[in-house]
Each structure stands twice: as structure tokens, then as C-alpha cells.
């Protein structure tokens, strides 16, 4: 079978299991928890999520710039548009949108754009390891060794792979992109922590970081739009050591996903709408000429 067929089969199985679980879930507790959520903390989480995307786009622009002249605003707009597409699509749809927009706005060749996205994934992995190590430097809990091990593996593995990427060399200046991506992970961690705490769950920063790590590892293939179900499952697993009930953890996951998806979707659709208007104006100008 083709890889796409296997993805559809796996996605169908995951969806069937999720529906079976959802039919027996205590949703009344979940909705009551959401109704009592602290909207100020959710707003703060939404702000941190936007900052995470801004710094991520900045790091990506610095990675592309040695190969092609990408403008800062182009990288920002393409990143938000790609995140919006990922909110309603699956697999690599968001990355495809980023490649298209780079070529349409700044004339970047598809090959260069694809290589830059692949390189950004490696840099983000190294930055995640750096962030986890920095987090554990100031936190000492019984769960710290798990994040410490994961951070070391990600950091060493990503830095090892970077040595084999010809368009990424230490001389090209990787320090700034890695630092920006580490800051992006920090903002993403704050997004998770404030969104979870807004529902009244008593969690430590370490457990919020564990939920972040599980969510990104579980959602790497993006089998569902915006990783629906994956995020909630990661939050449930991440909060289990604190004894948070599943219904409460799912409420935290739903609140988290709402503030991650809705603002970005609005911004991304505005960017894509403006792009569509520009394309229409150009077509009319060509036809008139």
C-alpha cells in the first residue's frame, strides 16, 4: 500500500477509538470545568501562543536568508498562514502553504523553501532540548529526570544531524535561530501552563512541560486537523502524575486548543484572503495589458 493509504487507515482507527472513548466519557464534568475557567489566564495563554509563532517565524527567516532574500514580514505571514492551514488540514498541508507563499511573495524556489523547512525542524528539535535543560536547571522535581533525558536526546540528536546538512553550518550562524526557537518553546510552554492552570488544575511547571513534550511527539504526523484528540490525550497523560481527573484534564486540553487555534486561524485566514485579493488584482492587470 501507498504511505498515504496507511495514514488514512491509521487515522480511521484512531478516530474510531476516540469515538468509542468519547461515548463513555463524563462530559458534564468537562463542560462545567470549562464554564468556570479563568478567561484572563486564557487570554495570557493566547498571547504567549502568538509570541511563540512570531519567534518561530523569525528563526525560520534567519535560516532561509543565507540561501534566499526572504523578508521578515513574508516569513511571519507564511508561518501564520501555514499554522492556520494545519488547523483545518492534516499531514504536511501547512508546510505546503508556506512553500507556496514564499514562492509567490518573494520568488523563493520551492527546493530552497523545502530545505529551509526541513532545517528548521532540526533546529527546533535542538532548541527544544536546550529549553528542557534550561527548565530543569531551575526545577527539581520527581519527574525532572524524564524531561532531562528527553532534552538531552533531542539536543544531541538534532546537533548531530545538523553536521550533515550542507546548507546549515556553524559558520552560517545557528546560535541566533536556536536561541529564538528555544524562546518559542518557552512561550509555548507558558501557553500550556496558563491554559491548564486557567481550568483550576493544580499542576507544576514540569508537568506542563511534560504535556507539551507529549503533545508534540504524539502529533508529529498530524493525523487530525490541529491534532484534535492528540492534544487532549497529551494533557491527560501529562497531568496524571498530579492526580488530575481525566474529565478535568480534557477540559484543560480543549481550552488550550481553543486559544491555540482560533486566534491563529483568524490571522491566517486574513493573510490568505489578502493573498487571494492580490492574486486576483495581478490577474486582472495582466488580462488588461
Image: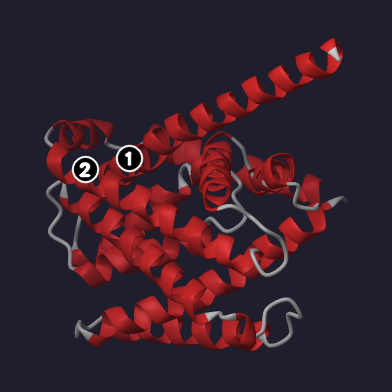
* 1 or 2: tag closer to the N-terminus: 2
Is 136 placed left or right of 75 in the picture? left
Q: Is residue 245 visible?
A: no
Percent across and percent down for residue 68 are 71, 61
Dot 1: element = helix
Observer-nearest of 20 and 218: 218
Q: What is the quadrant of residue 274 in the picture?
A: top right
The residue at which mark 1 appears reads as 259
Front one among 280 and 253: 280
Which quarter of the rendering shows the C terminus? top right
Element carrying mark 2: helix
Residue shown at the point (57%, 60%) measured from the top left: 61
Residue 42 disc label:
2
Query: Are the two marked residues, 1 and 2, in contact with CB atoms closer than 8 angstroms?
Result: yes
**In screen coordinates, is 93 left or right of 239?**
right
Residue occupying the point 58% across, 37% down: 85
Q: Quadrant of residue 273?
A: top right
Crowding at dot 1, Cα within 10 Å, few <14 / some 14-19 / many 20+, comes out as many
**Can residue 259 be seen in this snapshot?**
yes
Q: Position of residue 180 (x, y in %)?
A: 43, 69
Residue 259 as seen in the image, left or right of residue 11: left
Position in image of residue 72 (x %, y %): 53, 53
Towards the viewer: 123 or 23: 123
Across and down, in percent, residue 177 comes to: 50, 72
Residue shown at 56% from the left, 51% from the top? 75
- Quarter of image, res 156: bottom right
* Numbered disc total: 2
As drawn, which residue projects farthest toward the front? 289
Amino acid at each position: 500500500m501507498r504511505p498515504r493509504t496507511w495514514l488514512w487507515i491509521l487515522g480511521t482507527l484512531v478516530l474510531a477509538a476516540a469515538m468509542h472513548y468519547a461515548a463513555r466519557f463524563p462530559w458534564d464534568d468537562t463542560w462545567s470545568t470549562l464554564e468556570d475557567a479563568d478567561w484572563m489566564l486564557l487570554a495570557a495563554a493566547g498571547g504567549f501562543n502568538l509570541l511563540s509563532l512570531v519567534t518561530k517565524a523569525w528563526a525560520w527567516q534567519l535560516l532561509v536568508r543565507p540561501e534566499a532574500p526572504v523578508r521578515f514580514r513574508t516569513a511571519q505571514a507564511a508561518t501564520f498562514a501555514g499554522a492556520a492551514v494545519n488547523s483545518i488540514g492534516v499531514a504536511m498541508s501547512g508546510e505546503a502553504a508556506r512553500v507556496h507563499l514564499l514562492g509567490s511573495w518573494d520568488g523563493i524556489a520551492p527546493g530552497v523553501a523545502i530545505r529551509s523547512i526541513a532545517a528548521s525542524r532540526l533546529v527546533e528539535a535542538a532548541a527544544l532540548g536546550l529549553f528542557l535543560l534550561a527548565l530543569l536547571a531551575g526545577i527539581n522535581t520527581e519527574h525532572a529526570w524524564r524531561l532531562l533525558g528527553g532534552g538531552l536526546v533531542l539536543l544531541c540528536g538534532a546537533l548531530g544531524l545538523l553536521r550533515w546538512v550542507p546548507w546549515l553550518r556553524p559558520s552560517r550562524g545557528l546560535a541566533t535561530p536556536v536561541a529564538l526557537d528555544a524562546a518559542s518553546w518557552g512561550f509555548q510552554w507558558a501557553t500550556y501552563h496558563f491554559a491548564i492552570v486557567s481550568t483550576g488544575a493544580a499542576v507544576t511547571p514540569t508537568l506542563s512541560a511534560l504535556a507539551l513534550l507529549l503533545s508534540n511527539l504524539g502529533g508529529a504526523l498530524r493525523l487530525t486537523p490541529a491534532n484534535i484528540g492528540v492534544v487532549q490525550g497529551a494533557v491527560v497523560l501529562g497531568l496524571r502524575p498530579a492526580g488530575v481527573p481525566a474529565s478535568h484534564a480534557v477540559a484543560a486540553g480543549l481550552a488550550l486548543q481553543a486559544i491555540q487555534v482560533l486566534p491563529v486561524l483568524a490571522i491566517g485566514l486574513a493573510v490568505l484572503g489578502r493573498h487571494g485579493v492580490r492574486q486576483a488584482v495581478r490577474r486582472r492587470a495582466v488580462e488588461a495589458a
